[in-house]
Every structure is written in structure tokens, then in C-alpha cells.
Image (cartoon, helix red, strand yellow):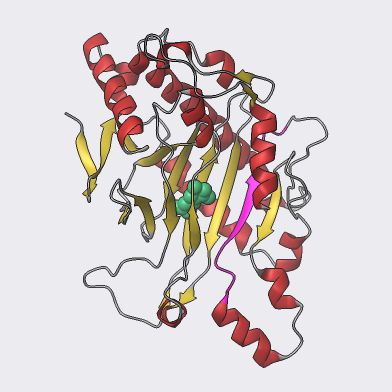
Amino acid sequence: MASTAVEKDNLFIPLIDFSQFLHGDSTSKNKAASQILDGFQHAGFIYLKNHGISSSSVSAQFAQSAAFFSRPQSEKDALEWYSARANRGYTAHGREKVTQLADKEDVEALRLAAPDLKESLEIGRDDEEDCPNMWPSVEDEAGRVFKEKSLAFFEECKGLHMQVMRAIAVGLGIEEGWFDKYTDRGDNTLRLLHYPPVRKEVFQKNKLQVRAGEHTDYGSITLLFQDSRGGLQVQSPNGTFVDATPIPDTIVINAGDLLTRWSNDNIKSTKHRVVEPPPKPNQATGEEHPARYSIAYFCNPNFDKQIDVIPSTCREGEKPKYEGVNSGDYLVKRLTATY
Ligand SMILES: O=C(O)CCC(=O)C(=O)O
Ligand SMILES: [Fe+2]
């Protein structure tokens, strides 16, 4: 049995030791693969430890992210996200609304009602034609290091995506490398997220206020690295939102809508959101919640691939529930609907 990371309201998110899949004998490997598949089929979420991405790589990327978001607003605005097809660049949510107001009191009132609760930078494969990444100036040394480190982290995550898809293949009883031809291009997005400090009264005044609204992800799987603040919640089968508490050195991985479709609804894409962090024992009670950082690596099948239901996920005599779609078009369509 895998140990359990989250257990509440009929939501059971397993904590799986991925070294058993990567380096174990065939019995351990198959066992880890079925635990992973089982987690995706029932919760839509798993936690992975010993995943092969070193804690120094992860903390270095968090440091790069914090340094990036501490740049002057004008520098970040110059890197603005520019199209759903490219899905690269900087987004400051709610900012436009705020800056259009001249009156100081109006600005403050609006800031309390609908504050900027997150900002993000999306980074894609760096060699995609006509879709450049939006890097800070590489003439500045920090900008050059940011680019180099972020691209190295991108590659590490790409490798883990391939391995997790292999585990899903083994779990499904198909050839281990079945997904490789869908994962080898790395048409993925590294999204750095910063939830700035926020006054507690913002949540008290508006019970619906969240740091990131509920949603499902779009692609195959998402690798989610969170800091120790907390606030991520996952929807349980009962409909409640349950804390997905940070566990050091683990990655939270969830399945996205395209994998649900690809697997004929065998695998779940589960709603999640980010809310006010839960109180921690012995924590000083200030007026403000400190900043939260997370890194989401959204994985997609190669954009030039047709995604037809995986034959082995249909039971005998069962028809596929979905028509084939092109992976890249599917993602662009979903992004266009939200941005
Ligand atoms: O910040 C987080 O923990 C979650 C972010 C997320 O779900 C997303 O960006 O899709
Ligand atoms: Fe998400």
C-alpha cells in the first residue's frame, strides 16, 4: 500500500516513492506504477517523493522565481504574455483594472474588493519557431542566469513527465514506452507563480475571495512544486475542498483534461484552487499572509499529435466517448477561453 498524503471526505491522495518505479526490481516497479495509476483514477492527484529532481534544483528555481518577481513592475510588464498559441510571457492578474483608476481612494477600495492576488511568468520550449520566450534582458547578468537556470529546470521536468507517463503506461498494462512519442518534444509550459502578501481582512471581508479560483488543468499532467505556506485545495468526491498540505521534497502531480479524454474518462482531472493559507500552530498572528510561491509545470502531448482514446482504456465492446483532437489545437482553444 502506498502511504496517504491527504485523507478527508473520501479524497485519498497517495504518497508514492518514485524510486521504486525508476530503480526497483520488476515487482516494485509494477507496484509503484499501479499505485500511480490508481491515484490518478480515484483522486486525480498524487504526491511523489524520490522523483529524481534534486531539492537543490527545486530551491534554486524558487530563488530564481523570487528574484524575477522582485524586478520593477515596468520590467515585468514589458514581458507581457502575448498569445494563446505561444502561451509565453508575464501576466499580472487584475492589474489593469487597478491602474486605470485615478482616485487614490477608488484604487484602495478596488484593491480590497478585487486585489491582485497572483502574477505569473510562462516559459515554453525555447526553440519553438515564432513563439519566443519573454526573457528579461540577457545583458544583465541576473537575466542571463535566470534564463539558463529556468531552461535547465524545464529539461529536468520534461524528463520527469516522460517517466510519469511511462509509469501510467505500465499501470495500464501497455508497452512502457507507449507515450514516448507523445512526450519527447517537450511542448510543455513552466509557469512561475507568485501570490503576493495579502492582508487577512481581504479574506474576512469577502468570503469568496481566493488566491486562485477553482479550475481543472488542461493538458496531460501538471507537476506542482509548492512552498511551505499552504493554501492549495483539491475537490473531494463529496464536493468539499480539502487542503493539499505541503510535504517537503514532494511534487504534487495532477491529471489534466486532455488525459481524461485520452483515457476515456479512466483518469480524473480534479478541480483545485488556492485559498487563504490555513493557520499554523505556533505561528505569529500578523495582519498579513506572507507571499506564496509555486511552480507549475504543465505537460502536454506533442502539439503535432492527434489524441485518440487509448485503445486499452476502452472496456471490451465499449466505444470511445471522444473524437480525436489535435493536442496543440486543444490547448489553444482552452487557453483562448480563459485569457
Ligand atoms: O499555485 C498552486 O499551488 C496551484 C496553481 C495551479 O493550480 C495552476 O496554476 O494551474
Ligand atoms: Fe491548476
**Mostly what secondary structure, the magenta segment?**
loop
Asked if residue 109 is positioned above or below residue 267 in the image, the reply reads: below
- Residue, x 69% and y 21% (percent of image)? 304
Front one among 168 and 218:
218
- Residue, x 70% and y 73% (percent of image)? 97
Q: Position of residue 201 (x, y in %)?
A: 43, 82
Q: Is 82 displayed left or right of 260 in the figure?
A: right
Residue 233 visible from this viewpoint: yes
Residue 18 visible from this viewpoint: no
Q: Is 154 displayed left or right of 131 in the figure?
A: left
Let me know if residue 115 is in the magenta part.
yes
Let me know if residue 192 is in the magenta part.
no
Q: How many marks?
A: 0
- Residue, x 57% and y 35% (percent of image)? 154
Q: Residue furthest left?
A: 1
Q: Quadrant of the N terminus?
A: top left
Q: Position of residue 277 (x, y in %)?
A: 36, 66
Q: Position of residue 150 (x, y in %)?
A: 60, 41
Q: Position of residue 61 (x, y in %)?
A: 52, 46
The span shown in magenta is 114-126
- Residue, x 34% and y 30% (percent of image)? 41
Asked if residue 84 is positioned above or below residue 227 in the image, the reply reads: above
Front one among 335 and 168:
335
Front one among 47 and 315:
315
User: Image quarter for residue 98?
Assistant: bottom right
User: Image quarter for residue 43?
Assistant: top left
